[in-house]
Image (cartoon, grey):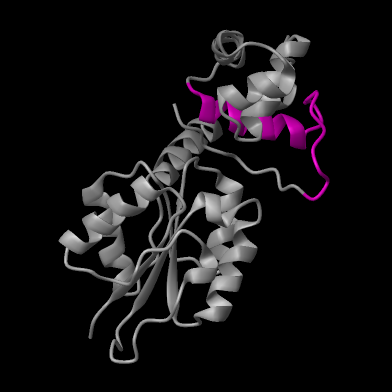
Amino acid sequence: MTTVVSVAIRNSLIREGVRRILSDSGFTLAEPVDDLESLSSPPAADTGEHLIVVDGSLLGRDGPAVVGDILHRFPDARVIALVSTFEFTEMAAIYAAGAYAYFLDQIPYQSLVAMMQMVAVGQKVAPPEIIDLLDNLLLLTEMPAQRHATLAYDLGEREWEVLGGLERGLPNKTISRDIGISESAVKATVKSLLKKLSVTNRTQAAVLARELAVQGQARFACPRPSSEVLLPTILRP
């Protein structure tokens, strides 16, 4: 049986790069497309698995719903999401919607091929950022139990704004735009936050921010939709 891969990626350079990598690795590819409406079922003669690679720009703001729509059209397909930024809440929702894999579009080509091969045999594949998340959660849970519950953090208004951005999974560029300061000022504030919170990286700061929010100790300036789930996020360096 032949495994057929459909590639739906808006950016022509990335689309062609993914096509070449998969074609050179022995996958049979349908005609790559730049929109979801142009996706089609493999020929009837191809009775193997149907993998659909979709990039984050086509998933849009409601990735899980888009994945659901794709699977409604192609019930036997296996969807792989390629995104530009890792976001834990989005990833969990996209897996829950039925996707088989969720990876950054900067994934090395050997890893992309290996991931596609695993999906082809029916395995759901988690991105390596999950390991980083688990490591950081372990470090935080190993801290004294009363530490975060009783320690008052002396943070200024700007630091709370930036910490709120970290907790939401935002990169420095987006934080700087949202709160109206330069990106270099955001970087300096993140460095100060890591020291004051006694954590070693942005992921640990995001996890701790979530704990503070749950305990009612956070003073994030940016309003959060009531339906948004407070879960830790991993950011690109």
Q: Is residue 97 magenta?
A: no
Q: Is residue 147 visible?
A: no
- Rendered location of residue 146, percent (x, y): 67, 26
**Vertical placement of 216 versus 21: above or below?**
above
- Rendered location of residue 174, percent (x, y): 62, 27
**Segment tinted magenta in the rendering:** 201-227
Q: Is residue 211 magenta?
A: yes
**Vertical placement of 229 versus 122: above or below?**
above
Position of 7 with respect to 210 (left or right) is: left
- Rendered location of residue 135, percent (x, y): 43, 37
Residue 150 figure quarter: top right
- Rendered location of residue 130, percent (x, y): 44, 46
Residue 209 figure quarter: top right
Q: Is residue 58 visible?
A: yes
Front-lying residue, 143 or 51? 51
Position of 148 with respect to 2 (left or right) is: right
- Who's the residue at 54% across and 50% down the image? 57
State which quarter of the image contains the C terminus.
top left
